[in-house]
Structure formats: structure tokens, C-alpha cells
Image (cartoon, helix red, strand yellow):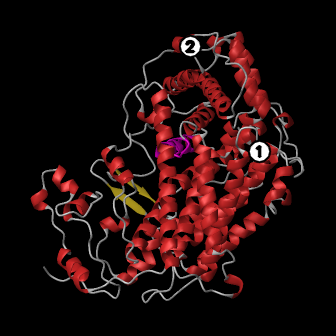
Amino acid sequence: MPAPKSSRQRFKPQLSCTLCRTRKLKCDRGHPCENCIKRDLASSCTFIHAGILRDRANHVQKPKATANTSDVHGRIKQLEELVVSFMQQQQQQQQDRNTNQPSLAHSPTTGSESKSETGRPSSLSDTQVWVDQTDLISTSGSLGRLAIDEDQQSYVGGAHWAAILDSISSLKESVNYEERPTQSDQEVERNPPLKTRGPQLLAGFVRKATRADMLASMPPKSIADILIAQMFDSGDISITGVHCGTFRKEYEQFWADPSQAPIMWIGLLYAIMCLATNLRILCGNDSPDIFSQVALRDQHEAITLFSEKTVQCLILGNYTEPCQYTIPTLLTYSLTEHFRSIDAQVGGWMLMGLIIRAAMRLGYHREPSYYPNISVYQGEVRRRIWLIITHLDLHVSCQVGLPRMLREDMYDTQIPRNLLDSDFDENTTVLPPSRDGDDLTICGSVTMKHKVTMALGRILDQANAITPMPYDEIMKLDAELHEGYQDVPERLRIRDLNALRHDRPELIVSRLGPDLMFHKGRCILHRKYLSPPSSLNSQVHPYSIKSCVDSAMAILSRHKYLWDETRPGKSLYHYKWKTTTLATQDFLLAAMLLCLYLTTFMDGETYAGEHAITFTRAEMLESLEISTQSASDFLANQ
């Protein structure tokens, strides 16, 4: 066999057999291996570098690692297993939720990533090919993670935590990190995870229905009143872009004469009731079950019914030809799908694309003041809805590790004013000025972090770009991110994490939002420069390394606080629905970056001066262990 192509990097023999490597299976390195025996392919089980490995075993004594290095190896391996276990625990909870909900039909798998047969993320090293090493250094940060299995393919960008997990796997190979199959790995291989469903509107079989069916399935007004009041009294209705005063009028008109209500508005009502029921469960509402006196057995069955009726109304109203109520209905429906999983699903990202196209079809991406046929009231409502869409597009795309669908040069809609719904209505001819920054409305809390949100969007664009960006441009984005965070009002910035315990819960949530976006932006922006000097890459960026480590540690400290305070009886318990998914994704990103740093700089980082890492290795490991345990405890109580 011809010798491998020469390289200035150390030669790394292939440890798996040829068939296991091709099929991306966990090879036990037996001769023959267990996978080949099970498939009756024992005679074809070959190891390309078997001779080299035997020679090394016979003639070369492997140097013993120091006790310190061995300890770090073991703790990093334990942390990696904890994070993977955390990820699998999320998937198991999603399977349990899907099992408890009646399925209308089998649907294709939608998920944020593919898995190998062992249940663990496939490694980029499994599909590694010979490329020019110089080109690899300049483009590796933008390659992302492409997993290809026999029945599924998936891609996430290089800034996603799953791609960083692959980087750790590759680094462990480069430092002779030998890992044998564990009993848990073999059990997962024998029992692969079940597939999950996607949004019912896109992937589910929906039964045919008529307008009469929609009205006949409507719960009694007494129940609807409780659900609607819950949404409006808490202010949570603002996340749907619905104007409270207008909807209340339409709601009363509906019950006075249901036959006159547009079918899409009925879908909006079902979607709001579905969202309200979801929030009752997520917030641990201890009041008696409001559905006990009707045909519905419990709140979970009500969610299933309301979701199905929402989809049927969207179909009956032909959402592909959007009208006045289509966008609010689709937005509210997407939020109900969001709560079906503690983790973000690719189906939600696809649903977001549908919403964006429908909104652009109705001109939401153009500034309403340019068009005299749009009233002052309608223009402000459209601005609110478009703001929600742009922010959701960014967050959902970031969670699934794929490019966002909207960029600033695609729209000119201005941000809405900091106003309460009671400040304007259908009869308003001139909008009042924005309320003072101290008088924070729900819409205002979103607009005040808009600048840092847009900076995060541009960072996500470069992270998903095919062409690497010069480091000077990276530093410009870094400056824009800092400028955007400085633009956030002082009362919405976190200076001391312990001081949050004295604030109102809604103010705590408003402060955590821009703070986490700022630190997440730094992690994504500088992640590709988290690498040590080498013979092929002498350019090192200590500022980027410090930015990654500092922000990752900040995220873990915030999330430890967040998970602690969302326990039953704590201050944020009734607000945990606003933080669960974002907390999960940000935690995984920060945890993977710290694991990557600890794995990369095994001998310690030596930069001095302003770019010196102020955290010790012991502090990083302790923070990872505490945060991972907090996350596992949080999921165990869901």
C-alpha cells in the first residue's frame, strides 16, 4: 500500500476498521470488530494501519502523561459526556412529550443535527480528506459541520455548539487521546433515539375541516375568557404582535355573532388559546384545571386540539395568499410549536421562512409612512410585527446553526415607538412620542436592545459566510457589538449579578436578554481564533482568545443563576418559559468553547498583559461542572 501523503503534521493512524469508518459506526477495534461480525462481514474487516500500530506497540514505549495532564484529560472527557448526556436528555424529554400528544400521522424527521448509529454527533474527522493545509487554516472556521448518515443529512455553521463539539473530538485525536467504547455507548447503539416530529403545518397530516367544524370545536366562552385574560393581564400577548384594544373589540364581536368572524381571525383565537394553555403549564399554574367540566380531559389535550384547529384555519384561509390576520396567526402558531420542544428544531426555522415570505408579500418590510393608504394605527402595528419577525429570525437561526433569512438591506421598516397599547388605537391620526426610558413597555424592552441585536445578526452573517473575513473586519464587528451594548439603557445592563436578586422579575428578564446577546456575540465572533500557535499557523490573536473565555464564563455564570432562580418557589419560576430554550443553546455554546479551550491549551495559556486569561483552569472546570449539573437538575424537574 502506498505511504500516506507527507505532511508537516504528525502522522495519525486510522484506528477504526474500513467499514466502520465508512458507515460512521463506533468501532471496538477488535479483529474482526463487533459491527462487522453482526453484519456477517468478518472477512472484510480490515485495518489500514494495523501493521504500523503493531510496530509501534512492539518497539516504541508510549510516554506516560503527567498526573496533571491525565487529570485534565479525564475531567474534560467527563464534561463532554455530561454535555452529550444533557443533549440526549433533552431529546428524551421531547420524545416523551410527543408520545403524550396524539399523533395525526407519521412525519419526516426534523432536528437540528444528525446522529451516528452510536447516538453521538458525527465527527468531521470521520469524513476528512487530504487538502492543502494552508487553505484549511483560512477556511476551517467557515466549514461548519456536515453530517451524512444512511437516512439523514444535516448541516450547522461553525459557530454552533455541535460543530465545536466536533473540534474537541478532532483535537483529542491530535493529542493521542485514546477512548474505548463504553457500555453506555454500546447501549445507545443498540437502542438508537426515536425520531421527532416537525411543525404540524409543514409535516403533519391535517384532517379536512369546515368553518362549521371550527365553530363547533370552540370551547365555552367562560373558558376562552380565562385564557384570553391570562394573556392580556400578563402582557404576554405583546409577543404575538396583537394590539390588545383592537383584539378585545373583535373578541366581543365574535361571541355576539360568530358567523361574521373571518376564518383566519378564528385561527388567531385558537392560536392564542393554545399559547395561553402552554404558558399555564410552563408557569406551573396551580389553579384548578379549567377544562375539567368539558369534553377535554386536561390541558395537554386542549393544546393538541387548539393547535390542530389553528392549522386547519390557516389552511381554510389559504395562508399562501396572506390577508390581514395571517401574519399574527402564523406568528402565534410558531410560538406554540416553539414550546413543544425544550430545544430548537429545524422545522421552526423553516416555519420562520414561511412567515417572512408571507409578511414580505404583504409589504411589512417597507416603511408604512411612505404609503398614504396605511393608517397611523396600522403602520405602528406593522412595525411591531416586523420587529418581532426580525428578532425571531435571528434567534431561531442562531439556535439551529444556520444563516438568518433577513438582512438590514432587505427592509426599511423603522422600529416602533415605546408605547403602550392604550396610547393609540384605530382613531389615532398622530402617534404620541415614545415614553420615557424609565417607563419601560414590553415593546420598548425589545426596541432598546435592537442595536445589539442587529450587531449580533451581522456577526452571525460572517460566521456563516463562505469566504473568511479579514481580522480587521472582525475587530470592526467587535466594536459594533460593544457600541450596541453601550446603547442599551444603563438600567437594562448587568453590572453585578448578585444585585439582580433585589430587582423585579420582569426587570431581571429584560436585563438578561441584551447581556446574553452581547456575550453570545463575542463567543460566535471570536470562536474561530480560539487556537494555539503552530508550525502552519503562526498568527495568534490573544484578544480573541480572551474574549471567548471571558464571555463563555459570563454566560455560564448567568445561566447558573437563571436555572437556580427558575426552580419552584424562586423569583423567576413563572418566567421560565421566556428563558428555557435560549438558556439551553447559550449554555451549550459556552460549555463547548471552554472545553475546546481546555483541550487546546493543555499546557496552559501564557499570554500576559491586558490579554491575560484571569480565570484559572480549576475555576473553568468548576464552572463547567456546576453549570452542567444545574442544567441536568433543571431538565429533571421539567
Q: Quadrant of residue 363?
A: top right
User: In the image, is residue 499 above or below residue 421?
Assistant: below
Q: In terms of depth relative to the viewer, which is nearer, 376 or 153?
A: 153
Residue at 79% across, 28% down:
245
Name which residue type carries label 2.
Ser
Sequence-earlier tag: 2 or 1: 2
Tell me the residue that label 1 is attached to: 443
Which image quadrant is residue 155 in? bottom left
Crowdedness near tag 2: few (<14), some (14–19) or many (≥20) residues, C-alpha within 10 Å:
few
Residue 332: percent from left, percent from top? 61, 34
Find out whether residue 357 is within the magenta segment: yes
Residue 153 in view in this figure: yes
Cα gap from disc 2 to disc 1, whole angstroms: 33 Å
Question: Is-magenta flag for residue 518?
Answer: no
Relative horizontal placement of residue 5, taking residue 585 as reference (left or right): left
- Cβ–Cβ below 8 Å for labels 2 and 1? no
Instruction: Locate residue 183 relative to residue 225 in the image: left or right.
Output: left
Say which residue appears at 36% left-offset and 31% top-offset. Answer: 106
Report which quarter residue 259 is drawn in: top right
- In the displayed structure, does residue 75 sit left or right of residue 387? left
Residue 276 position in % (x across, y down): 67, 28
Look at the magenta stretch and give its main secondary structure. helix
Residue at horizontal 38 percent and vertical 51 percent from the top: 184
What numbered label is drawn on residue 623? Answer: none
Q: Quadrant of the C terminus?
A: top right
Whether residue 462 is visible to the viewer of this picture, yes or no, is: no
Q: What are the residue bounds of the magenta stretch?
A: 342-360
Q: Which mark is residue 217?
A: 2
Foreground label between 2 and 1: 2
At x 71%, y 84%, the residue is 610
Q: Is residue 507 above or below residue 181?
A: above
